[in-house]
Image (cartoon, helix red, strand yellow):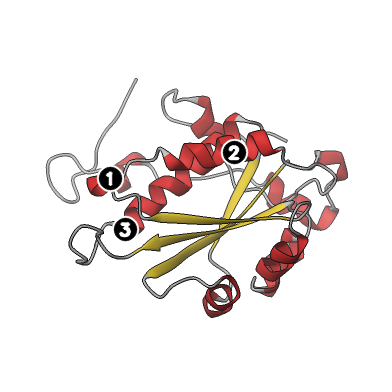
Amino acid sequence: MPKPAHTSVPINTHATDRWSGRAYDADRHVSLEDLTGVLEAARWAPSCMNEQPWRIIICDRHTNPEAWETAFDALAPANQTWCDFAPILGVICSYTRIDKDDTTNRWHSYDAGQAALSLALEATARGLMLHQMGGFETDDIRASFGIPDRYTIMTMFTLGYQLPLEKVAESMKIRELTPRTRKPLGQIVFAGKWGEGFVGGR
């Protein structure tokens, strides 16, 4: 069920095809090779001073069901309604300090975001779907997985294969089929000064 972005100019297909669907195929496992590849992409994300502050916890329903259930229990009820079919749940954390001098790393969350996008793009390239979420109990995740205080819990995510459209429940189809939208470039990119909308073209 592809849902490519309609861009103003052509861009790479991994970017256009990446989207945060919710209908996962519970019968398809993610191979260790593909999971490792997705995580390797995150490992090579850029970061300020090469600090690499991101840390990722993987909970695979088929190899570690207890960890998967622990992560699932921390999700907001609205997310639990569809995450129940995702074979993998993940947690992305970010170290808030700079290693060499133990000062605050104000770029840590930005860098963790770059790692998260690398995850998503590599997942798309491998025919997988990744959906990031903010709806979960941070304190529960921290306590359950023993995450140190110096790490900020940034997001949770699902990873797996998209369910074929003919198998998607009617209650989910509207949301899954709704076209993707974005603000125009001129609202988010400025030319030379704040508020001066960038005008692009082919």
Quarter of the figure that contains the C terminus: top left
Residue located at (86% from left, 40% from top): 166
Point out the residue furthest to the left here: 192
C-alpha gap between disc 3 and disc 2: 23 Å
Element type at mark 2: helix
Residue under label 3:
108
C-alpha gap between disc 1 and disc 3: 11 Å
Q: Earlier in the sequence, mark 1 or mark 3?
A: 1
Residue in the foreground of this view, choosing between 62 and 81: 62
Residue in the foreground of this view, choosing between 111 and 149: 149
Residue under label 2:
36
Answer above or below: position of 8 versus 69: above
Q: Position of residue 66 (x, y in %)?
A: 75, 66
Residue located at (57% from left, 76% from top): 137
Q: Residues within 10 Å of mark 3 (few under 14, many from 20)?
A: many
Q: Amino acid at mark 1?
A: Asn
Q: Quadrant of residue 98?
A: bottom left
Q: Is residue 146 left or right of residue 63?
A: left
Q: Earlier in the sequence, mark 3 or mark 2?
A: 2
Point out the residue furthest to the front here: 100
Quarter of the figure that contains the N terminus: top right
Q: Which mark is residue 50?
A: 1
Asked if the residue at tag 2 contacts the one at tag 1, i.e. Cβ–Cβ closer than 8 Å, the answer is no
Q: Amino acid at mark 2?
A: Thr
Answer above or below: position of 114 versus 6: below
C-alpha gap between disc 1 and disc 2: 21 Å
